Image (cartoon, rainbow, N blue to C red):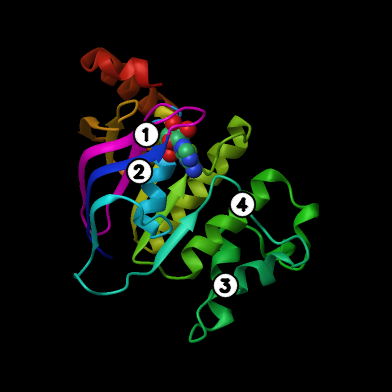
Amino acid sequence: MTHIRINVHSKTYPAVGQAGHHLAIANLNLSLNAGEFVCLVGPSGCGKTTLLNIIAGLDNDYEGDIIIGKQHTHPKIGYIFQNPRLLPWRTVRENIELTLDKNQSPAIIDPLLEVMQLTHAQNVYPERLSLGMSRKVSIIRGFAVEPDVLLMDEPFVSLDAPTARQVRELLLKLWQQRPHTVLFVTHDLREAIALADRLIFLSAAPMAVISEITVPIPRAERYHENAIETFRQQLLNDYPEIKQLL
Ligand code: ADP
Ligand code: MG
């Protein structure tokens, strides 16, 4: 488990269809403690995917620095994208094996398939999977690399509510068995409350932190819709500025 310090002075994109630049992120400072599950909540287009790409090292075109664990080491990052991005010509198991390092045994996949209830589907091709099943495969891929940090970009978008809930609960089960530092992006406040140790609310561009709130609900009670809903109402009352972000 690894702590993260995020410090983005600025991230700009060329403005689309006009001269100049679009300032996506300005003076953003965030820290995650080792083993913490943090949800980023912010409106569409505020720069959440941009930020994850920067943390993952996929985008180096920014001013600032990201420190993951000890400085000058190469952290391992697990990145669960919004779309599962499975190779259609590979089976479920092969898609997961492709992400492993050479020194990792393929046997580490078995318990992950079991927790995610996919052992029976490991030899099928992605076209035969439901959307919920392909999301589970991409979660397994994220955990399989045994990352220092796990990034998740709205991984449950467009699932129906009962499926999203089931996959969320399996994700928590996996995370409690194998604690990781997690940065999870969502614009669904109920989902964020169900998952996070801490919520970080982000403004529209240029992205900035509006508030940071620790979720006080004990882990054992996160499965109760009532506990989630009561806390959600309380948040919206206490922090009315959150409403415009959702
Ligand atoms: P979010 O994930 O919060 O919805 P994004 O990080 O995808 O937001 O995008 C943030 C802003 O940056 C948006 O205004 C988007 O249009 C812009 N943007 C994202 N990627 C590019 C790109 N490759 N070129 C130009 N603008 C981009
Ligand atoms: Mg996005």
- The disc, 3 or 1, on the residue closer to the chain's N-terminal end is 1
Which amino acid does the dot numbered 3 rest on? Ile
Could you tell which of marks 3 and 2 lies nearer the N-terminus?
A: 3
Q: Position of residue 225 (x, y in %)?
A: 44, 28
On the picture, is 16 further left or further right than 203?
Answer: right
Q: Residues within 10 Å of mark 3 (few under 14, many from 20)?
A: many
Q: Which residues are magenta?
A: 15-43
Residue at mark 3 to residue at mark 1: CA–CA distance: 44 Å
Q: In the rendered image, which residue does mark 4 sit on?
A: 84
Q: Residue at x 23, y 17 (%)?
A: 239
Residue occupied by mark 1: 21
Q: Nearer the viewer, residue 208 or 110?
A: 208
Q: Is residue 164 left or right of residue 75?
A: right
Per the rendering, the mark at residue 109 is: 3
Residue under numbered circle 2 = 220
Which secondary structure lies at badge 1? strand
Coordinates of residue 114 in the picture (x, y in percent): 59, 64
Please identify the quarter of the rendering in which residue 186 is found: top left
Q: Secondary structure at mark 3?
A: helix
Separation (CA) of disc 3 from disc 2: 27 Å
Q: Quadrant of residue 25 in the image?
A: top left
Of residues 90 and 232, the one nearer the viewer is 90
- For the point 73% across and 62% down, the residue is 121
Distance (Cα) linking label 4 and label 3? 17 Å
Q: Nearer the viewer, mark 2 or mark 1?
A: 1
Mark linked to residue 192: none
Which residue is at 40% across, 39% downward?
A: 13
Marks 1 and 4 sit apart, C-alpha to C-alpha, by 31 Å
Q: Amino acid at mark 2?
A: Ala
